[in-house]
Image: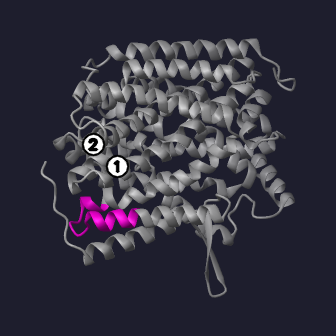
Amino acid sequence: MNDLNPVNPVAMTVFIAFFVLVTVIGFFAARWKRGDLTQLHEWGLGGRQFGTVISWFLVGGDFYTAYTVIAVPALVYSVGAYGFFALPYTIIVYPFVFAVMPKLWKIAHAKNHITAADYVQGEYGGKWFPAAVALTGIIATMPYIALQLVGMQVVIKGLGVTGEMPLIVAFVILALYTYASGLRAPAMIAFVKDIMIYIVVIAAVWLIPARLGGYAHVFDAADTYFKAKGGATGIILKPTQFTAYASLALGSALAAFMYPHTMTAVLSSSSANTVRKNAIFLPAYTLLLGLIALLGYMAIAAGVHVKSASDMVPALFNTLFPSWFVGFAAAAIAISALVPAAIMSIGAANLFTRNLWRPLVSPNISPEGEASTAKIVSLVVKFGALLFIVFLPTQYAIDLQLLGGVWILQIFPAIVFSLYTRRLNTPGLFLGWLVGIVIGTGLAISQGLKPVFALHFGEAVYPVYIGLIALVANIVVSFVVSVLSPRRVVAAA
């Protein structure tokens, strides 16, 4: 128990009730849009039959996660305007999705590709470069799953319960219904999750400022707080933050749909037109994200003080809302961890099975064997992330997730550029990927795993997102080596 925040029986009852509801939905999902779950495309991509509405909830469900709801307002609470870089990034990403992802979907559908590495293998042949793409996706995803657990851990602690057991129980349940229902489970749960999150956020941005004296007071309080705090904080960006802010937004946008979970959500759509429609309607989530970010300023105005900024959102709700709503909000955020964690584990399992296990270990594996292997790997991935949180400090997951963003960006040329040009070949892309990984990792380590690196041009200093620096090096090497080496031979479909 937490002495500072004793267990609230009303809040806990509401929380458990919604968690049970989601569990029932997760197991029921196997009967929804029935398919042969012994086939990987049925288990891991929902049979590629999700229409516009389902895909909208699914993509939103795995893109806007529990850690987003916790971390974005916590960053705004800590550093002010700089924390809003997530807003332009989610605005930039949807035109990219509209232009690029329908083209990728068409090729993947025509050639039965289930993963991004499948697409790379189909375009370039071989097994080692697709394996490198798959390994990059899996490693970048693991700390991302761990951070969903961090989000869930924070809200459970906000209800007055400490220790790892509630987290373990929640993820055992998640593991079982994902194993049983595949992608259908998070797709169905995403409906409940998103509706709950919208209710929580709309209630918060309406009622909290009303109790604090209006938005003018909220912004005044935040401005006064950051001026007193000094340093590179404030409700307006400092000129020295411009390049870091812009490059973080651009780099994050380019990386966002390279991750296995977002790629899986796109490839599960029923048509290329469904992907386009979602790119049009998904910015509604950006509005939601902007409102969520404002919770950071509201916590300052409400006088919320916490040892860790991640505890800010639960502390704010505990301060200003009745117990039943605290339980409802905690359930919404916890469920926001379950949906992306399920999709992430499925995406990682698909990559392992299709692009590591099958080509490198068991080339004659049957379709049923593929699905069975993926189900088992999805369990291993989840419990690997769980062990990560139980036995290692949370900071490791946060630091590795920052590295994950740098790494996943390095598969961008192989997936995106190859949709539009035939000039690139395997040696160029493989060497470009390697250079990007080495430079990105080296720069990140040199900065203590901080996401930006200061570039010096004469006396001018420009802090830039490390992932973008590494990507530029990757692109240059990919094109130069491809020009100097023989042209690629497109593998037969």
Q: As displayed, is residue 443 above or below residue 372?
A: below
First in sequence: mark 1 vs mark 2: 1
Q: In this rendering, would 438 be left or right of 318?
A: left
Which residue is rendered at x = 58% and y = 20% of the image? Answer: 170
- Amino acid under disc 2: Pro
Q: Position of residue 70 (x, y in %)?
A: 65, 39
Front residue of 250 and 434: 434
Q: Magenta stretch mostly in which secondary structure?
A: helix
Q: Which residue is mark 2?
A: 359
Question: Do we see residue 209 in this rendering?
Answer: no
Residue situated in front as seen by the camera: 456 or 424: 424
- Residue depicted at x 75% and y 43%: 309
Residue at (56% x, 43% y) in the render: 289
Q: Is residue 127 visible?
A: yes
In the rendered structure, the answer to whether residue 288 lies left or right of residue 151 reads left
The span picked out in magenta is 417-433
Q: Residues within 10 Å of mark 2 (few under 14, many from 20)?
A: some
Quadrant holding the N terminus: top right
Residue sitting nearer the eye, 218 or 403 = 403
187 sits left or right of 67 in the view: left
